[in-house]
């Protein structure tokens, strides 16, 4: 194993699971999703990179948590937009039914088409 994989840059903290100084015990059923240090059966300290930064340089700062946070924000934004879309669809359906049930529905629809430029 390369010396770079066995050492960590001074003052650099790893934010993902398993630290160089405190590797996590791992079995096939408990492998963390991000970068982590582990000890193989021969007692050698090994890095299992989970991000490209660590693949290229084992001593680099782990970006797994940053990528995970970005993914979480994107998923939250997607959920918010899905909720907003559902609300808008419900409102549109209710408004459409209200206009169709109105005695002057044809006049209202013709006015809406005129305002929309159709």
Image (cartoon, rainbow, N blue to C red):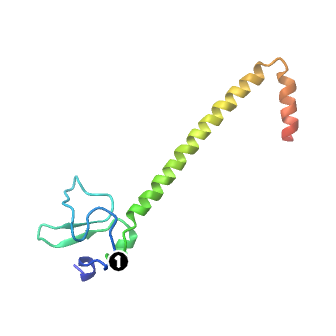
Examine the image and state in which quarter residue 80 appears. Answer: top right
* 74 and 8: which is toward the camera: 8
Residue 35 vertical placement versus 100 (above, below): below
Looking at the image, residue 89 sits to the left or right of residue 78; the answer is right
Circle 1 crowding by C-alpha within 10 Å: few under 14, some 14–19, many from 20: few
* 80 and 27: which is toward the camera: 80
Examine the image and state in which quarter residue 116 appears. Answer: top right
Q: Residue at x 25, y 57 (%)?
A: 31
User: Quadrant location of the C terminus?
Assistant: top right
Looking at the image, residue 72 sits to the left or right of residue 89; the answer is left
Q: Residue at x 79, y 19 (%)?
A: 102
SS for tag 1? loop
Examine the image and state in which quarter residue 97 appears. Answer: top right
Query: Farthest residue toward the bottom?
Result: 3
Q: Position of residue 114 (x, y in %)?
A: 88, 36
Q: Position of residue 9 (x, y in %)?
A: 31, 79
Residue 29 vertical placement versus 114 (above, below): below
Q: Residue at x 73, y 27 (%)?
A: 96
Looking at the image, residue 17 sits to the left or right of residue 42; the answer is right
Q: Position of residue 117 (x, y in %)?
A: 86, 41
Q: Position of residue 26 (x, y in %)?
A: 20, 59
Residue 27 vertical placement versus 99 (above, below): below
Q: Residue at x 60, y 40 (%)?
A: 84
Which residue is labeled 1 in the image?
Answer: 57
User: Quadrant location of the N terminus?
Assistant: bottom left
């Amino acid at each position: 194993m390369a010396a770079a994989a066995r050492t960590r840059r001074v003052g650099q903290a790893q934010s993902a699971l398993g630290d160089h100084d405190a590797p996590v015990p791992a079995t096939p059923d408990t492998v963390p999703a991000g970068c982590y240090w582990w000890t193989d059966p021969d007692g050698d300290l090994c890095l299992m990179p989970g991000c490209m930064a660590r693949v290229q340089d084992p001593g680099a700062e782990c970006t797994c948590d940053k990528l995970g946070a970005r993914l979480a924000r994107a998923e939250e934004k997607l959920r918010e937009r899905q909720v907003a879309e559902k609300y808008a669809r419900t409102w549109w359906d209710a408004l459409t039914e209200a206009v169709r049930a109105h005695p002057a529905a044809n006049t209202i629809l013709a006015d809406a088409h005129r305002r929309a430029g159709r």
